[in-house]
Image (tube, grey):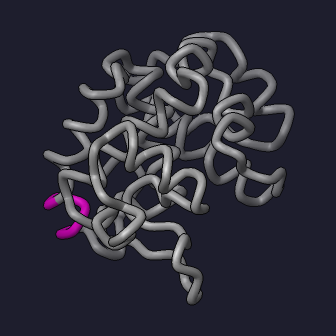
């Protein structure tokens, strides 16, 4: 609903409790924080806890947040007490996937601060997204749609001017 019709709407609905858990665990409880987190997860995994990045790498992206790289698996395993090094597919467990999403959101540099500033560019940089205009515009567009949803159409001022300058458009009223 927030991001329009989803190809797997039933899976997104099934994952709603997990997404709510990730938002609460990460402190993403304001409209801007919820919008930024959900836009990030939508772009990373389509809001699916069972999403797996294509490829054969043992440390490829998995879960809502697409945890990638041995270093991130090691840090997350240590911080969350989950044996992701022996079994990286544990990142696909629904509860673990939600915990990883909130872990990544807070450990990557307290992304709530960037969300409070409406700064999706800072969110992308902190998460290690390489600059790709098409991906950046999609993530910013998702953020604006979610922010519009959570604010009832009253999108606050801030970095939105920068987003619009980059080509992202706020939702039509």
Q: Is residue 155 above or below residue 63?
A: above
How many numbered discs, if any?
0
Image coordinates for residue 9, horizontal then vertical, percent: 25, 67
Tell whether 130 sits left or right of 48.
Answer: right
Residue at (30, 54) in percent of width and height = 97
Identify the magenta region: 10-14
Q: Where on the picture, by quarter, is residue 116?
A: top right
Secondary structure character of the magenta stretch overall: helix
Residue at (72, 42) in percent of width and height = 168
Residue at (28, 44) in percent of width and height = 81
Of 15 and 67, the residue lying toward us: 67
Q: Is residue 153 above or below residue 156?
A: below
Residue at (64, 42) in percent of width and height = 127
Image coordinates for residue 73, horizontal then vertical, percent: 48, 56
Indicate whether residue 40 is drawn in magenta: no
Furthest toward the bottom, the residue is: 56
Indicate whether residue 12 is drawn in magenta: yes
Of 68 and 66, the residue lying toward us: 68
Image coordinates for residue 112, horizontal then vertical, percent: 50, 19
Image coordinates for residue 10, horizontal then vertical, percent: 18, 69
Tell whether 160 sits left or right of 62.
Answer: right
Of 76 and 29, the residue lying toward us: 76
Q: Where on the picture, by quarter, is residue 144?
A: top right
Q: Is residue 64 above or below residue 54?
A: above
């Amino acid at each position: 609903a927030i991001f329009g019709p989803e190809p797997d709407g039933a899976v997104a609905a099934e994952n709603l409790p997990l997404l709510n858990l990730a938002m609460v665990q990460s402190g993403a409880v304001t409209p801007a924080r919820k919008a930024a987190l959900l836009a990030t997860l939508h772009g990373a995994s389509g809001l699916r806890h069972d999403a797996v990045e294509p490829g054969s790498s043992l440390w490829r992206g998995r879960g809502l947040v697409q945890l990638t790289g041995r270093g991130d698996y090691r840090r997350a395993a240590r911080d969350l007490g989950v044996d992701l090094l022996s079994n990286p597919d544990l990142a696909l467990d629904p509860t673990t996937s939600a915990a990883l999403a909130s872990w990544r959101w807070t450990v990557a540099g307290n992304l709530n601060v960037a969300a409070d500033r409406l700064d999706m560019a800072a969110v992308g940089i902190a998460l290690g997204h390489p600059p790709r205009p098409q991906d950046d515009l999609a993530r910013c567009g998702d953020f604006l749609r979610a922010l519009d949803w959570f604010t009832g159409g009253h999108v606050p001022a801030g970095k939105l001017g920068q987003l619009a300058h980059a080509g992202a458009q706020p939702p039509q009223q």
